[in-house]
Amino acid sequence: MDYPRVIEGDLQVRDQRFVILASRFNEFVVEGLVRGALDTLRRHGASDKQVEIVRVPGAYDMPLVARRLAASRRHDAIIALGAVIRGQTPHFDYVAGECAAGLSRVAAETGIPVAFGVLTTETVEQAVDRAGGKAGNKGADAAVTALELVNLLRRLES
């Protein structure tokens, strides 16, 4: 089928700057996500000078820090990485929901892409599987999303 003109972002790092916003809570899972995101950015051409890592205590704290980072305009995209694992209380629902909604608001209100790489899983095993185990690496996926969005937004501006 023939399509009209299609505009999309590519996966080439040029002069873009990225910040990885990483939760320290469930750090044994989050570190796998961070490694996946860094590896992906480097494989697509990013130097270490184009990437910063900012650590926050937990996923609930991410929207506040993401808003500050976006307002600084020092980065072209934010890659939010964390792990919220369901426990025996409704705490999971509040943390996961507020984190997702807050990060989405930051992107919508500032125009800075916020790639959502915060795992929300039922078990530790599911989280480990998604942080570089048998289910891939959602940190790497979030880095690809951030890169594509930055390039798409640049194309839409020109």
Image (tube, rainbow, N blue to C red):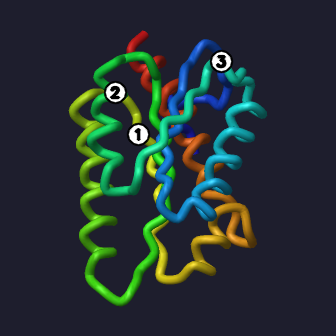
Left or right side of 39 for 37: left
Residue at the image position 74 percent from the left and 40 percent from the top: 39
> 158 or 110: nearer the eye?
110
Q: Amino acid at mark 1?
A: Val
Q: Are marks 2 and 1 in contact (CB under 8 Å)?
A: yes
Which residue extends farthest bottom? 88
Image quarter hosting the N terminus: top right
Q: CA distance from mark 2 to mark 1?
A: 9 Å
Q: Residue 81: horizontal and vertical position, in percent?
A: 50, 51
Helix, strand or loop at label 2? It is helix
Residue assigned mark 1: 114
Tag 1: Cα neighbours inside 10 Å, few (<14), some, or many (≥20)?
Answer: many
Residue at the image position 32 percent from the left and 50 percent from the top: 61
Q: Residue 85: horizontal and vertical position, in percent?
A: 46, 75
Q: Earlier in the sequence, mark 2 or mark 3?
A: 3
- Numbered label attached to residue 49: 3
Q: Amino acid at mark 2?
A: Ala
Residue assigned mark 2: 70
